[in-house]
Amino acid sequence: MNPRGLKNSPCNSGSGALLPYGRQSIDEEDIAAVAAVLRSEWLTTGPIVSRFEEAVAQFCGARSGVAVSSGTAALHTAMYAAGIGPGNEVIVPPITFAATANAVIFQGGTPVFADVQTETLLLDPAAAERAITPRTKAIVAVDYAGQPCDYRELQSICRRHGLVLIADACHSLGASYRGRAVGSLADLTVFSFHPVKHITTGEGGMVLTDCPDFLDRMRAFRNHGITTDHRQRSERGSWFYEMQDLGYNYRITDFQCALGLSQLPKLPDWLARRRALAEQYVRAFADVPFVRPLRLRSGRTHAYHLFAVRIGFAQSGADRNMLFQKMRDLGIGVNVHYIPVHLHPYYQNRWGTAPGLCPVAEAAYEQLLTLPLFPAMTDADVERVAAAVTELIEESGQQLEAVHDSSR
Ligand SMILES: *Cc1c(COP(=O)(O)O)cnc(C)c1O
């Protein structure tokens, strides 16, 4: 019995009243791995950080990784590696978490919003190319919901214009594009290990790269711009260090990386489970008008961080808003990803962005609804969520038809 005196039904996966849109999976093995590090010599910047970096890089087909304290820190670190500074523009899509664009500003650069494609909500390569100016230095591809962007087109644009391609792959760990893993598709690839993402370190993030120069810059950046860490100095028996550039404390601890390292081998099963649940949603909505899952493009595997659908009869957002409220009332933790970044008051006030800048993203936003999806969900959970959406949509459809009939 949970605190509200209700029996746990399979629908809430034993967690309490609300079926969340996402949740971590932690087992006793994970806990033991963390505890072992707490009993060891190094709590931070020790051997487990390097082991985690190597394991993630290997899993993703990249040469090296730099683990940091969050996905946001990883984005900032990637912007630094790419040499973003005052006067530089970086092209970003609006359908993403605000941190994607914020990281450009952290380095003194200017985020420039380019619209997404209607059916996938992935950055439109043509829109990105149109946004290029002599000041553009990088493009950020966001693999929204877990589907890789059009990397072939984006790579070719970046090559033609001499730009750095950064992948915000916080949704797409374990996805692939034309047989290549996410992590090997851009100059710099950023992951988050927040509990809602595919694997977790509590808070944490990583940047993958094949470029040794980027790697050195990023290792220094996460440690105040200092070119050796205290473990290297301890091993060499030396006190000397130099700060070569301005950096931050973006270090991650060894016990966090122990959690990540323990989670990583489970990722393939979790991805398979996410895909199976997503397919169950797609089948459930196949004949439901006005509930449209996003399109999966050919040549890609999807990591399904999110299962997002577009809802509605109207462009106004009324149907989505109604459904959001009624689903929450039923104890189903739906969500909305994302409010287009350029519509946040900070961006409108400080950067002069306004509605109309990215019409595809803005129209999609009115209709977007994220349904619960995480590996520990049961088939019955998905069935219940899909049935609730279908019922509520049919109800509202009948009301619309009734209004239509009576006005005739
Ligand atoms: C989660 C996320 C981030 C930020 O990661 P944190 O670890 O929360 O700092 C950045 N971009 C996207 C697309 C994300 O989903």
Image (cartoon, helix red, strand yellow):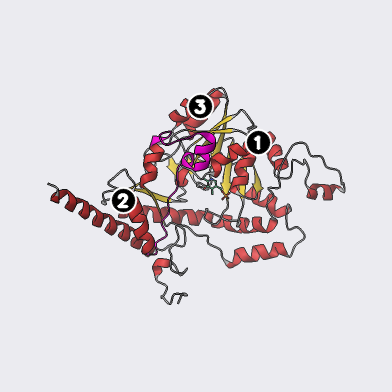
Q: Which residues are magenta?
A: 330-359
Cβ of mark 1 under 8 Å from ligand 1: the answer is: no
Position of 389 relative to 248 (above/below): below
Q: Position of residue 14 (x, y in %)?
A: 46, 70
Q: Position of residue 103 (x, y in %)?
A: 59, 40
Tag 3 residue = 157
Tag 2 residue = 319
- In magenta stretch: residue 156: no
Q: How far is mark 3 from mark 2, CA to CA?
A: 38 Å
Lateral position of residue 403 relative to residue 286, left or right: left
Instruction: Name the image quarter holding residue 184.
Output: top right
Chain-order first, disc 1 or disc 3: 1
Amino acid type, label 3: Ile
Q: Residue at x 50, y 33 (%)?
A: 352
Amino acid type, label 2: Asp
Disc number lying in front (1 or 2)? 2
Q: Secondary structure at mark 1?
A: helix
Q: Position of residue 105 (x, y in %)?
A: 60, 37
Chain-order first, disc 1 or disc 2: 1
Report the predominant secondary structure element of the magenta stretch: loop
Q: Residue at x 50, y 60 (%)?
A: 23
Amino acid type, label 1: Ala
Q: How far is mark 1 from mark 3, CA to CA?
A: 20 Å
Give the crowd class for mark 3: few <14, some 14-19, many >=20 residues within 10 Å.
some
Q: Residue at x 83, y 42 (%)?
A: 241
Tag 1 residue = 81
Lateral position of residue 402 relative to residue 345, left or right: left
Q: Position of residue 93 (x, y in %)?
A: 48, 37
